[in-house]
Amino acid sequence: MKKLILFLLTIVTVSGALMAQPDKKHSDDWMQKIRAEKVAFLTHKLELTPGEAQKFWPVFNEFEEKRFEIHMKRREMERETMDNLEGLNQEQLKKISLDFIGLFQREADLMKAYNEKFFQVLPAKKVVMLYDMENDFRSQILREYKEKQKGDNR
């Protein structure tokens, strides 16, 4: 199991290094670190066998990439809207609201489609656990961030 985790961490790190852009190096390094931690965390918590991991990670990584694109579009829309909020009329605001909801719908549709793909590569119990473990991972990252902030402010 340790060899599998090390192998997966190496793949994530190397692929991230190859795709990193020089002007975004710090951000990319941070994202790669988080991704590597997530791979290790989920692999351990879901107790993925080597065969399951081999099938699961390409599907999950594809899902994460598509979900990240939707999140980035939503964040961009939020920023643009808030920067121009006072200059927008009611009709423009209604359209923005519908577009915003449309992005949530796209994410829900994506999750539904990939849920089916996850069932093809993992037992149902592990698919259900995946969603809970993702929440646990986010909570852990937030706790670590808060702890680091406390330490930096001392």
Image: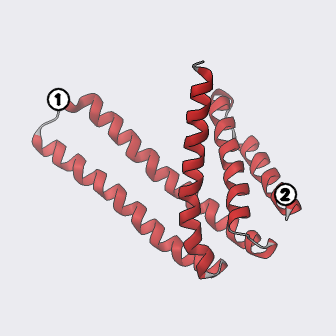
Residue type (three-letter) at the residue carrying disc 1:
Gly
**Residue at horizontal 60 percent and vertical 61 percent from the top:** 62
Q: Quadrant of the C terminus?
A: top right
Q: Mark 2 against mark 1, which lies toward the viewer?
A: 2
**Residue at horizontal 55 percent and vertical 34 percent from the top:** 146
* Residue 11 locus on image (x, y percent): 79, 53
Q: For residue 21, which quarter of the picture? A: top right
* Residue marked by disc 1: 87
Q: Secondary structure at mark 1?
A: helix
Q: Tag count in the figure?
A: 2
Q: For residue 150, which quarter of the picture? A: top right
**Residue at horizontal 79 percent and vertical 52 percent from the top:** 9
88 over 101 or under it: above or below:
above
* Residue 57 locus on image (x, y percent): 69, 65
* Residue lying farthest to the front in this orientation: 154
- Which residue is more in the foreground, 148 or 85? 148
- Which residue is more in the foreground, 7 or 123? 123
The answer to whether mark 2 and mark 1 are in CB contact below 8 A is no
* Residue marked by disc 2: 7
Q: Name the N-terminal-most of marks 2 and 1.
A: 2
49 relative to 29 in the view: left or right: right
